[in-house]
Amino acid sequence: MRYYESIIVLDPESPAEDREQVSQKIQTVVEDLQGEIVSVDDWGKRKLAYAVKNKRYGYMMRTLLKAPVIAVGELERLYRHSEPVIKHMTVILTDKDLANKELLDKVPVALDAPDTGRRRRLG
């Protein structure tokens, strides 16, 4: 299993219940496919760089997850069919990304070998 970062932009006019429902669906999809949610960051309402579906603002959420490849496909399908989602992007986190200090607090890592100092994922 690999680590992924998924960022979604939701319609800012959608009620909080819809945002919570999308978050619950993400968690359900990932856990049903033997993955795990590492963290969910709620970035709140932000101004977009350009209009998406005639919206200048969007409600943003970032999810860090560890899952098999099939879970990412299911998430992409979920995003396409969820009405509040107006934009989405999911990327694979490389070892270089995981070495980033911000992510180190959320993802367990260990040294490969004392002489190389390279990092690898645990699990």
Image (cartoon, grey):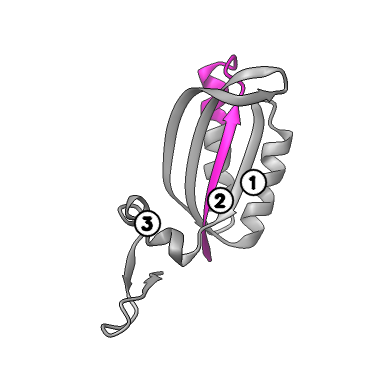
Residue 113 in the image: above or below residue 28: below
In x, y percent, where is residue 30? 56, 50
Q: Earlier in the sequence, mark 2 or mark 3?
A: 2
In x, y percent, where is residue 68? 58, 62
The one nearer the camera, 50 or 106, is 50
In x, y percent, where is residue 59? 53, 24
Q: Does residue 114 appear left or right of residue 99 in this picture?
A: left
Give neighbour class at mark 1: few <14, some 14-19, many 20+ (Cα, 10 Å).
some
Spatial distance from mark 3 to mark 1, Cα to Cα? 25 Å
Residue underneath mark 2: 30
Secondary element under disc 3, as helix, strand or loop, is loop
Q: Amino acid at mark 1?
A: Leu
Do callouts 2 and 1 mark residues in contact (Cβ within 8 Å)?
A: yes
Q: Amino acid at mark 3?
A: Asn
The one nearer the camera, 29 or 65, is 65
Residue 108 in the image: above or below residue 46: below
Q: Amino acid at mark 2?
A: Val
Magenta region: which residues?
1-21
Q: Which mark is residue 75?
A: 1
